[in-house]
Amino acid sequence: DAGITQSPRHKVTETGTPVTLRCHQTENHRYMYWYRQDPGHGLRLIHYSYGVKDTDKGEVSDGYSVSRSKTEDFLLTLESATSSQTSVYFCAAQAGTSGGAGELFFGEGSRLTVL
Amino acid sequence: QQQVKQSPQSLIVQKGGISIINCAYENTAFDYFPWYQQFPGKGPALLIAIRPDVSEKKEGRFTISFNKSAKQFSLHIMDSQPGDSATYFCAASPNYGGATNKLIFGTGTLLAVQP
């Protein structure tokens, strides 16, 4: 257990409203990720972070922004939610190793419904 | 192309049988191939992973077979048990050397093991 907590776990909101999802980790992992999971699409990377204030776009970043002001917190913001952003969002963290791949530790997900 | 194609979409196996899930990729830069297991309401968790310098890796009842020339890899679950019922995701990532683990996931296989 990599101590990854997501909040809120469930949220219903209306189109056009801003939404922020929070990911908190207790293991001091360097890398953090936000994925969305949709039927038929698997998990798709939205944004990731390779350190405090260091972030970059993933595969499906349009309509999303992220911030990482502390090692332990990674925030995902939908500036103006749309129905296409209804999904289950997963945060993940990875211990920092130079080069190559490593195990991702996932949170339990945040289910977002945009009406 | 960054895709990882996974099949079948769903699979029903009798207890004690062999479950086989297949994945194919196109990007020859991929050099890390993990499988993640996800139970309902939970985040994915690493099950087993392989690098292309070996053709097979076994951990308990779970085996990855890797065919580099065909750009395919598969997960075999021997003596499948009802507790193995879950969604399985294959994934792949390139080794950017010092960069993050930007995993590309397959679309998932829902496995049901009948008692």
Image (cartoon, coloured by chain):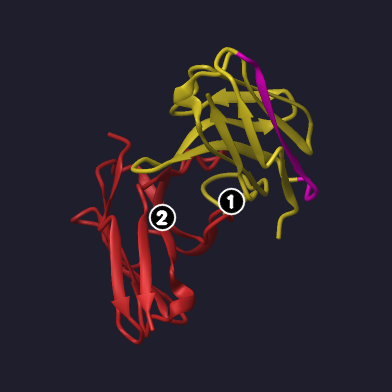
- Which mark identifies residue A104? 1
Q: Is residue A1 magenta?
A: no
Q: Is residue B23 left or right of residue A11?
A: left
Image coords of residue A2 (percent x, y)? 71, 55
Amino acid at dot 2: Phe
Residue name at image x 36 percent, y 40 percent: A41
Colour that chain A carries in the picture = yellow
Say above or below: B53 vs A101. below
Q: Is residue A26 magenta?
A: yes
Q: Is residue A49 left or right of residue B69?
A: right
Image coords of residue B16 (percent x, y)? 35, 87
Q: Which residue is mark 2?
A: B89
What letter labels the chain drawn in red? Answer: B
Q: Which is nearer the eye, B92 or B30?
A: B92
Residue name at image x 66 percent, y 22 percent: A19
Task: Characterize the local packing of mark 1: few (<14), some (14-19) or many (20 or more) Cα atoms within 10 angstroms.
Answer: many
* Quarter of the rendering containing residue A76: top right
Q: Which residues are magenta?
A: A17-28
